Image (tube, helix red, strand yellow):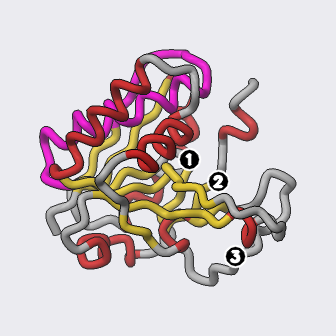
Amino acid sequence: MSTALISYSTTKYNEVFKNTLEPTLGLWSGPKNHSYWNTSVDWAAATRIKPLSILMELRKFNSVLYVDSDATIMSTDVNNIDSVVGDAPMACVFLDHGKWYNTDSNVVEPLTGTMYFNRDAIPFLRIWESASRTSNKPDGDIFAELLAKDSIKALQLPIEWAYIKNRPDGKLGGIPCDSPIIMHHQASRTHRYA
């Protein structure tokens, strides 16, 4: 396995990392790195650190599996990422809002809580990082806008790679997942305005 599992946290979310993702990192058998950013910026600004953090890690590793610090690794299947992505430069889960929220929505959102990148994605990551420096939007909104415009396409990971524990209303999402590989707990729902 050549891919490294990476994450980052800011001052506000470091305890979340220590209580959520860190205890499950033992399920990952490859290299890993967590970076701590000593800053107390608001939630949206904290998310915009993500592309820079990923770029910095790609200086050390040929490919990375980025996981938000409020996630839990649920299975050793996480170690299969290289065979799942093949030679794709980047990959993420695309959430179908119509199915997830049981509505007639046709929105399909690329999720940024679990993402894979190799060095072929560096040009895209540089554009994402630059756009993040001049925006007030959260990272996911910027990522989605750029993905819609860019010639590089993200491979779609199965929902098991970024399964969200529940919807904002507390109900289970409308897409079943019996065996999540990575579970996201959406800590921002409670920490965003605290």
User: Residue 63, how many percent across, how many down?
Assistant: 20, 55
User: Residue 3, how many percent across, how many down?
Assistant: 21, 60
Marks 1/3: CA–CA distance: 21 Å
- Residue at horizontal 69 percent and vertical 80 percent from the top: 176
Q: Residues within 10 Å of mark 2 (few under 14, many from 20)?
A: some
| 33 inside magenta stretch | no
Q: Which residue is mark 3?
A: 175
- Which quarter of the rendered picture does the C terminus lie within? top right
Residue 70, disc: 1
User: Residue 42, how many percent across, how many down?
Assistant: 61, 20
Q: Which residue is mark 2?
A: 185
- Asked if labels 3 and 2 touch by Cβ distance under 8 angstroms, the answer is no
- Of mark 1 and mark 3, the one earlier in the sequence is 1
Type of amino acid under label 1: Asp
Please give the range of residues in magenta. Answer: 35-63
- Asked if labels 2 and 1 touch by Cβ distance under 8 angstroms, the answer is yes
- Of mark 1 and mark 2, the one earlier in the sequence is 1
Q: Secondary structure at mark 3?
A: loop
- Residue at horizontal 56 percent and vertical 32 percent from the top: 138
- Asked if labels 3 and 1 touch by Cβ distance under 8 angstroms, the answer is no
